[in-house]
Amino acid sequence: MIGNLVRFGRRQLHTVVSREIIKPSSPTPSHLKTHNLSLIDQVNANLFMPMVTFYPNTGICRDKTTLDLKNSLSQTLTKYYPFAGRHAKVAPSYVDCNDNGAEFLVASIECGGLAVAWSLSHKVADGSSLFHFMKDWAKMNRFLSTEPKHEFSNDPKFIHFEYMNINSRGLDLEISDDCVTRSFMFPSSKIKELKQKVKAMTTESGKPITNPTRVENECEMNPESFISELRNQKTQFQAIRNIETAMGIFSEWDLEELLRKFTGLYICSSLCGNSAYEIDFGWGKPVKATHAGDLRKNSFILMDAPNGDGIEALVCLGNQDMAIVQNDPELLAFG
């Protein structure tokens, strides 16, 4: 599942050179062969998270680079054993950590440099976990190229969940040809202005928000009530002291009814703070990190800007909606 192809919009900019399966360098212990998915993971969206990092051409040897990447991936998969397993295509409740490995593709692209793309089921890992894996893979690659006997110092921790099968297909996000994806940059100075505006508006309402974060947004043009309620819910959830209590709360919901309510909503995910621009395989830091391929309709992904100054928003909307957004004077004022 690592190394999926890079695709932007409808243009295909690659030629596949080779394809193989990379297995963990050591077998997964028998007591770790089954990784149960939590209730949240089971109802999570049925999608993969393709990401890509681009590196400048530094004259590196492609054959040696490919061999190093394979070796370091094999070593890293031993630590991230669920990533080398398999789960059912429909309504999975666990990952079979069978060491079947990850698909590794080598492709030539037209960017003049080097790119590493990866993709993993959202039911197995969220964005933060995936970036941890990529940074550890990159670190392993750096050490193996200079110190072949290097051992990983910090093992990742996988939370154990009791088996629970709710037989749910999970959240389905709309796929549509009538949509377009655009990138919007919001520099830190403009985000600071927006924070000050929100603070002033909420103070006037009598429900002041003293420190809005970079990724809290308006809802029905009433930011004071939305942000206040969002923080209230976050505080209540953070007060839960153990995972069993949290899962008990979710198990009381009518999940199918809950999933139906998601139809037609806008989905926003933040990958900010995950240090995508720190993924160094030994060739230096990437010049660009982004989502690879098409987003689902009415979805947004927030990432750190390439230069560290602000936020990049990847926005996928219907063609008519995007035309309105791109000409919105209030949005343009903060871009």
Image (cartoon, rainbow, N blue to C red):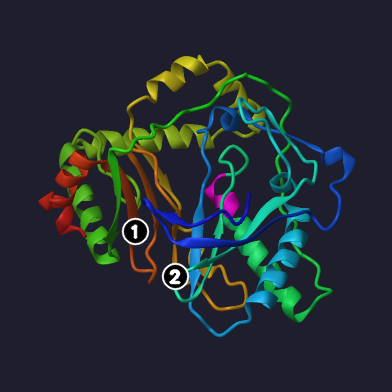
**In the depicted view, which residue is nearer to us: 159 or 33?**
33
Residue 124 figure quarter: top right
Residue name at image x 38 percent, y 31 percent: 174
Farthest residue to the bottom: give it.
59
Name the kind of residue labelled 2 in the image.
Answer: Glu
Part of the protein shown in magenta: 126-130
Q: Quadrant location of residue 244?
A: top right
Q: Which mark is residue 312?
A: 1
How dense is the environment of label 2, judged by Cα within 10 Å: few (below 14), some, or many (20 and up)?
few
Numbered circle sitting on residue 271: none
Using the rendered image of the protein, determine whether residue 275 is visible from the camera's viewpoint.
no
Nearest the eye: 52 or 227:
52
Residue beneath disc 2: 110
Residue 69 visible: yes
User: Circle 2 — which element?
Assistant: loop
Asked whether, in this view, residue 162 is left or right of residue 57, the answer is right
333 left or right, relative to 178: left
- As for residue 127 lying within the magenta part, the answer is yes
Left/right of residue 59 with respect to residue 315 in the rendered view: right
Whole-percent x, y for residue 274 in the image: 51, 58
Callout 1, which amino acid?
Answer: Glu
Residue found at x 45% / y 52%: 271
Label 1 residue SS: strand
Taking the magenta stretch, the answer to whether it contains residue 260 is no
